[in-house]
């Protein structure tokens, strides 16, 4: 069975509703969806998915436990991450529950093949392009993270060039907000093999400021080296004809919004990632504050698709929630994404 995963709690519930509505439109009401619980704040999430029989909540601690234990072991092998996080008052692995997305690969998870999308994304076209590529590849991505590997690995680490070649980094790294894969990847034996290499010094290449993303990239790339063609990584952005490949990030300013779709040079985006924008921005907008951010009309279209009467009626000039913050975030990220 094919399906779509996301990761959410009540903080991002407005974004979750928009994502679920976009999936209904572009993947069909019959497409199964599983919401992975980010933490225990789930009251609004449960209410949002209750009328959607195709959506289930995954909140079993036993499902997440081995992946959280694995994450702790990974970072215990890192030379500085734990100590740095402790100085900042972080008692555990930074954003540990973000790593629950790894459970999509667990043998007990519901989907044989899956597309994972962060809650701050919208599906804007059929997801079949991902599932079709899974017929011949173990992991499928679609982004331009290869333009900036510094958000994946510590590019100053001397060991990075020993572990991965520049060619591997270019063709294989990806943003962990969107990827497709299969259930059963990363067995206990394979995870132990990865931990052995990390403990032998390779952990220094991980990027502690994006721990779930860094580790997931390491896992897939290292396993691709070991397994060869049986675990191939396929980035659609690098393999689609240049005239067909589209960007996907809110950091791109040239997209055109039109009736719930977003276009890049006349081609509809497959998905749009509101990367770098806080949930508070979306929550303020939904509460009626006329805050501004890129492609907000597309978000509003899907958020209130089934509740048009609840869509906020804004008055006055649009304002930034925190003047300059959004612009700085987008400027910082713009070079890294298409």
Image (tube, grey):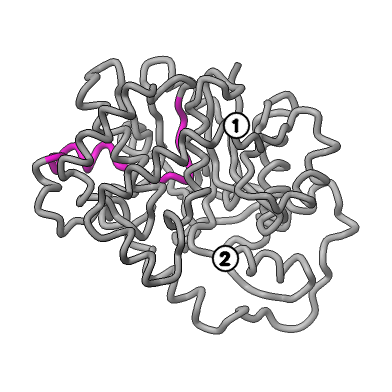
Q: Position of residue 293 (x, y in %)?
A: 59, 69
Q: Which quadrant holds the N terminus?
A: top right
Per the image, is 178 magenta? yes
Q: Residue furthest right?
A: 309
- Can residue 32 be seen here? The reply is yes
Q: Which residues are magenta?
A: 163-181
Q: Position of residue 29 (x, y in %)?
A: 75, 29
Q: At 64% from the left edge and 68% from the top edge, which residue is drawn?
A: 280
* 312 vs 95: above or below: below
Q: Nearer the viewer, residue 231 or 312?
A: 231
Q: At 50% from the left edge and 25% from the top edge, which residue is drawn?
A: 106
The residue at which mark 2 appears reads as 278
**Res 318 → quadrant:** bottom right
Q: Nearer the viewer, residue 188 or 172?
A: 188
Q: Mark 1: which secondary structure?
A: strand
* Numbered badge on residue 26: none
**Res 139 → quadrant:** top left
Q: Earlier in the sequence, mark 2 or mark 1?
A: 1
The residue at which mark 1 appears reads as 4
Q: Is residue 27 left or right of residue 275?
A: right
Q: At 43% from the left edge and 57% from the top edge, which residue is drawn?
A: 94
* 12 vs 67: above or below: below
Q: Mark 2: which secondary structure?
A: loop
Q: Nearer the viewer, residue 223 or 91?
A: 91
* 127 vs 69: above or below: above
- Estimate how packed mark 1 is, as few (under 14), some (14 to 19) or many (20 or more) residues with alpha carbons within 10 Å: many
Q: CA distance from mark 2 to mark 1?
A: 23 Å
């Amino acid at each position: 069975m094919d399906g779509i995963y996301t990761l959410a709690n009540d903080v991002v519930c407005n974004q979750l509703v928009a994502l679920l509505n976009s999936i209904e439109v572009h993947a069909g009401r019959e497409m199964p969806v599983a919401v992975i619980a980010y933490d225990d704040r789930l009251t609004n999430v449960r209410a949002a998915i209750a009328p959607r029989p195709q959506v289930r909540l995954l909140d079993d601690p036993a499902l997440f436990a081995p992946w959280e234990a694995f994450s702790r072991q990974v970072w215990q092998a890192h030379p500085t991450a734990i100590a740095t996080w402790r100085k900042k008052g972080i008692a555990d692995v930074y954003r540990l529950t973000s790593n629950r997305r790894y459970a999509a690969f667990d043998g007990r998870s519901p989907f044989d093949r899956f597309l994972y999308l962060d809650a701050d994304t919208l599906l804007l076209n059929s997801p079949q392009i991902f599932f079709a590529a899974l017929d011949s590849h173990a992991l499928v991505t679609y982004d331009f993270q290869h333009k900036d590997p510094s958000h994946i690995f510590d590019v100053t680490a001397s060991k990075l060039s020993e572990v991965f070649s520049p060619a591997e980094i270019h063709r294989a790294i990806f943003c962990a907000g969107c990827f497709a894969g299969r259930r059963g990847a990363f067995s206990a034996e394979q995870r132990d093999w990865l931990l052995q290499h990390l403990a032998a010094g390779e952990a220094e290449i991980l990027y502690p400021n994006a721990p779930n993303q860094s580790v997931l990239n390491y896992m897939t790339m290292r396993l691709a080296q070991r397994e060869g063609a049986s675990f191939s990584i396929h980035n659609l952005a690098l393999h689609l004809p240049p005239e067909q490949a589209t960007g996907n990030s809110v950091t791109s300013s040239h997209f055109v919004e039109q009736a719930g779709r977003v276009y890049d040079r006349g081609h509809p985006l497959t998905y749009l990632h509101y990367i770098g924008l806080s949930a508070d921005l979306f929550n303020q907008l939904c509460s009626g504050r006329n805050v501004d951010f890129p492609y907000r009309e597309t978000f509003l279209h899907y958020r209130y698709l089934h509740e048009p009467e609840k869509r906020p009626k804004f008055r006055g000039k649009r304002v930034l929630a925190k003047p300059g913050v959004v612009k700085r975030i987008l400027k910082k990220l713009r070079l890294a994404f298409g």
